[in-house]
Image (cartoon, rainbow, N blue to C red):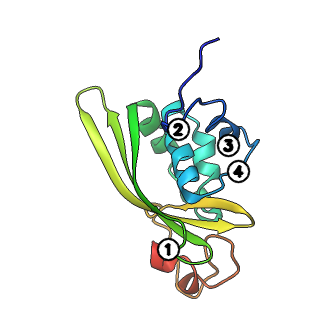
Amino acid sequence: MPETPCPCGQGEYAQCCQPLHTAQAKAQSAEQLMRSRYSAFARHEIDYIVQTTALGQQQALDVPAIADWSKSNQWLRLEVVQADENLDKTHAQVEFKAHYHDGKQAHVHHEVSHFVKQNGAWFFLDPTTGLQTTMKQPCICGSGKKFKQCCAQYL
């Protein structure tokens, strides 16, 4: 059987992002999580996109819009520009370019994403959810800290 390349560009899908998509493994770094999320968009693994978003943001995601964006584009390649895995003890940043084609022309989605590690798992901090969070509320990541002392500076 021929090997299936992983959309993230790091090898064969069965050994790269598939174990993360099927919950057989957890991402060991923010960059690995970001790569697996790109692969999830390319492979239409929408549940994985939701499950790897910060716990307090998941209910605010526009899942139909995420699914539509995933399925309406051809995902060409991922380019990681830089990864800073140690912004502090639990936060990281990954800058990347996702190359895709919308059926009319090629595009590049260039983003600097932030991630938080909670209970040994990495999660994406989604700046687009529109959640109304005050600085004194518990953090969206589930750390138990106040939002202003945890993830606020990264959103």
**Residue 11: which quarter of the image?**
top right
Give residue 72's position: percent from left, percent from top: 39, 31
Number of other residues with Cα within 10 Å of mark 1, as a class: few under 14, some 14 to 19, many 20 or more: few
Of the two numbered discs 4 and 1 in the rendering, the one whose residue sits closer to the viewer: 4
Residue underneath mark 2: 10
Residue underneath mark 4: 26
- Disc on res. 18: none
Report how far apart the C-alphas of labels 4 and 1 lie in the structure: 29 Å
Task: Give whichever of 28, 20 is nearer the camera.
Answer: 28
Q: Which comes before the other along the chain, label 4 or label 2?
A: 2
Residue underneath mark 1: 132
Say whether residue 62 is left or right of residue 2: left
Label 4 is placed on what type of residue? Lys
Q: Secondary structure at mark 4?
A: loop
Number of other residues with Cα within 10 Å of mark 4, as a class: few under 14, some 14 to 19, many 20 or more: some
Q: Which comes before the other along the chain, label 1 or label 2?
A: 2
Q: Which comes before the other along the chain, label 3 or label 2?
A: 2
Residue underneath mark 3: 20
Report how far apart the C-alphas of labels 4 and 2 lie in the structure: 16 Å
Number of other residues with Cα within 10 Å of mark 2, as a class: few under 14, some 14 to 19, many 20 or more: some
Label 1 is placed on what type of residue? Gln
Above or below residue 79? Residue 73 is: above
